[in-house]
Amino acid sequence: MSIIREGYYFAGVALLVAVLFYFAIHPYAAILPAILACYCIYFFRNPKRNIPADESLIVSPADGTVQDIVHLDGDDFIKSPCNKVIIFLSVLDVHVNRSPIAGEIKVQKYICGRFRPAYKDSVGFENERHLIGIENEKIRVTVTQIAGILARRIVSWVTLDDKLDKGELYGLIRFGSCTEIVVPDDVEILVKKGQKVRGGETIIGKMKK
């Protein structure tokens, strides 16, 4: 288990406040910032995952709960019938995002918007979000990070033409959010609504031969 670099700042500030409160006010005053520091370490955790090697398998881009599975006529990147899997992340879930396939980033968009609760049906259209389209010789996949009422910051460590391995970290959404993955219609969806998934490890779908 490790934590990502953004976590050191938040945890460090909270620990510093705890120390200042301990000596300047009262030892009891340090309890709340100390708890906050522990939560920051927990929130920014980056657990090791076992990434399936089979190239036909598409893995979850995030930890969380499958909120819905929606059929679409197409999107801006996958210009054919496709399915969207919506994953809700609570404040207790791991919040790093992982690439669902190995491939190259061909599309990248950041769309400004609102900060409605991430479990609302319309957040994929109204809320602030970051979209990448990943492509390899076999498939195109769209992944969108969506901000929520607490998630006011979407972090991306990638840009156009970057190459990603399956399960590789590419971004983060801070403090409660939603992630969507869109796959072509010929991909067999292997998760169900209400199912808990783990980023980089749970198999979202399988390419049909």
Image (spheres, rainbow, N blue to C red):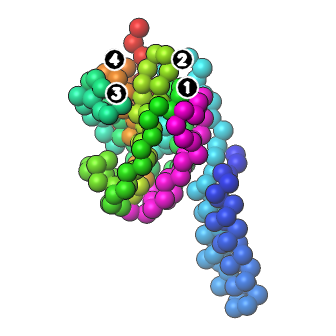
Please state if 134 lies on the left or on the right of 126 as rendered.
right
At a point 70% along the width and 46% down the height, the residue shown is 1
How many residues crowd around disc 4 within 10 Å: few (fewer than 14), some, or many (20 or more)?
some
Q: Is residue 169 visible?
A: yes
* Helix, strand or loop at mark 3: loop
Query: Is tag 4's residue or tag 1's residue first in the polypeptide sequence?
Result: 1
Disc 2 target residue: 55
Disc 4 target residue: 186
Query: Is tag 3's residue or tag 2's residue first in the polypeptide sequence?
Result: 2
Image x and y of residue 91, in percent = 48, 57
Q: Are marks 1 and 2 in contact (CB under 8 Å)?
A: yes
Is 155 colored magenta in this rendering? yes
Q: Is residue 108 above or below residue 74?
A: below
Q: Is residue 25 above or below residue 32?
A: below
- Secondary structure predominantly adopted by residues drawn in magenta: loop
Disc 3 target residue: 78
